[in-house]
Amino acid sequence: MSVITVRTTPFEGQKPGTSGLRKKTRVFMGNHYLENFIEAIWQGIGGAEGKTFVLGGDGRYFNDRAAQVILRMAAASGAARVIVGQNALLSTPAASNLIRKRGTDGGIILSASHNPGGKDADFGVKFNGANGGPAPEGLTAKIHAATEAISEYRIWEGPDVNLTIQGETQLGPMVVEVVDSVADYAALMEALFDFDAIRALFAGGFTMRFDAMHAVTGPYACEILEGRLGAPAGTVLNGVPSPDFGGGHPDPNPTWAKELMDIMMADDAPDFGAASDGDGDRNMIVGRGVYVTPSDSLAVLAANATEAPAYKDGLKGVARSMPTSRAADQVAEALGTQCYETPTGWKFFGNLLDAGRVTICGEESAGTGSDHVREKDGLWAVLLWLNILAAKKVSVAEVMADHWKRFGRNYYSRHDYEAVETEKANALMERLVRELASLPGREVQGMTIEAADEFAYDDPVDNSRSEGQGVRVMFEGGARIVFRLSGTGTEGATLRVYLEDRVEGPEGLDRDPAEALATVIAAADEIARIREMTGRDGPDVTT
Ligand code: VG1
Ligand code: CO
């Protein structure tokens, strides 16, 4: 075995988006493509020399090959040790936990998250820092700059490392440590929640279905729910990870997790349903006959977190991404704690969590988490829900009714227009930005626009500024529409339209969200001319 230096030239577009670099799998499989990006990561962090990393992924197609390449490149660049999940599998929150627990210099996560997997689908690579969180914008900018100037990379030549057996092996001067993918994460969950109470809940006949969507959470959910918590076998559905996620989108929402939705809306539905995404950082929560929007779930978890041992002393603060509904703000106000509003993407929560300003964070895209790791965490949210249900001895429907009665309700929906031609999507957003100044005071669909702006975020911890984070239109009476372009797609542009309306109650808390939001939806089209400018009749996905 020996180190070789390989000459290469830059690829255009190796620019990390909302969450790492995502491209078509075949692009990543192309000559030098993955290698260039990994070399750029080493350069972005000031070299790999003497450093320790965590490595794992969601098991999608090319996960195993990419892991071998990264190990050989880490060894050739002088890394001291890489801790790898067995078979190169680690959920995103489990990777974040390992980075923190083992005090490594960071980690590489192989995932395109909720995007489909397979040779003709998507792949992704993400770097997380020593705090366990996604690289902040300053670092991703450095990595991107390095991809534009790259001329060579170093790699060991030699046979694959055996990642099927736990234990240490040597790759040149570097140690490869293969660890159980689940054990440390399961131990962390057991330390946060009242497992005895949840065990008693299941023992009392409480029924649940967890849809792992053929993705990475299968082994985690089986060990924790069916193993440690005693839920009956069969509680976990689609629990064996597959490279193409069974041909589906591993995105836990009513559209892509339809199998679970159908189970939960049936007459003989179980008490509780949940699903998770490709890399295990998202969650969907459903009660018998009731779907809980992620924005409401964040608010409910914040309001009831003290039921779980880890949060019994209360919350330091709450944070939500800007497009997430303002249901959490109501809770923070009632608790007398701060609610921060950040741009989309978990990387913006890292500083707030590190500085001890917030305990719980969430996004409307089905991401919720806390200061236990520095990523959103699907199973964590499911377990906190279970802990709350076990402690309060109520149903999901009752939790929601109580919550809305106490805090009012923020009706919410997101409309996605996928794979729109990039020029059309850009033109729509540019037009909106140009119109901003003229919007306040305008009447649209019988509502008056109160304010409109393009969201920018000043990080209160490191004072960095992030601009161009989406257009917000606020109406008198509490309705709001947000427009932004996705930063995780691999084809054309995805326009996301976030729709919200506020009802204080006690009247009107029980409406159908689509009907409750009809005026706001019409206003969104009128303001942004969505149909006209995209040529689409309606959204591809509604969540
Ligand atoms: C989407 C979501 C965002 C989330 C990101 C990564 O980003 O909107 O809230 O943080 O995906 O989630 P975008 O730029 O496409 O809107 V995951 O679970 O795909 O890593
Ligand atoms: Co994810």
Image (tube, rainbow, N blue to C red):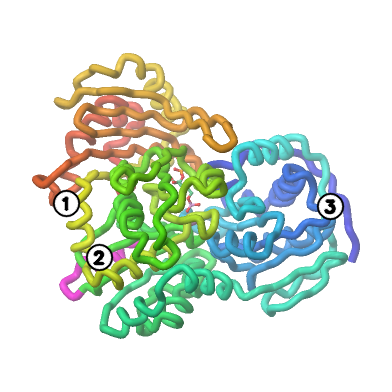
Question: Closer to the N terminus: mark 2 or mark 3?
Answer: 3
Question: Closer to the N terminus: mark 2 or mark 1?
Answer: 2
Question: How busy is the neighbourhood of tag 1: few (under 14 within 10 Å), some, or many (20 plus)?
Answer: some
Task: Examine the structure image and report whether residue 265 is included in the region drawn in magenta.
Answer: yes
Residue visible at 20% across and 46% down? 408
Choose top left, top right, bottom left or bottom right for residue 387.
bottom left
Q: Secondary structure at mark 2?
A: strand
List the residue tagged with mark 1.
405
**Magenta segment boundaries in residue numbering:** 257-268
Query: Which x, y percent locates residue 498?
Result: 32, 39
Distance of label 2 from label 3 (alpha carbons): 52 Å
Query: Which x, y percent locates residue 414?
Result: 32, 43
Q: Amino acid at mark 1?
A: Lys
Compared to residue 214, the image places residue 469 above or below, namely: above
Query: Which x, y percent locates residue 283?
Result: 39, 60
Q: Amino acid at mark 2?
A: Gly
Which mark lies nearer to you, 2 or 3?
2
**Outermost residue toward the right?**
2
Question: How busy is the neighbourhood of tag 2: few (under 14 within 10 Å), some, or many (20 plus)?
Answer: many
Choose top left, top right, bottom left or bottom right for residue 431.
top left
List the residue tagged with mark 3.
154
- CB-based contact (under 8 Å), mark 1 and mark 3: no
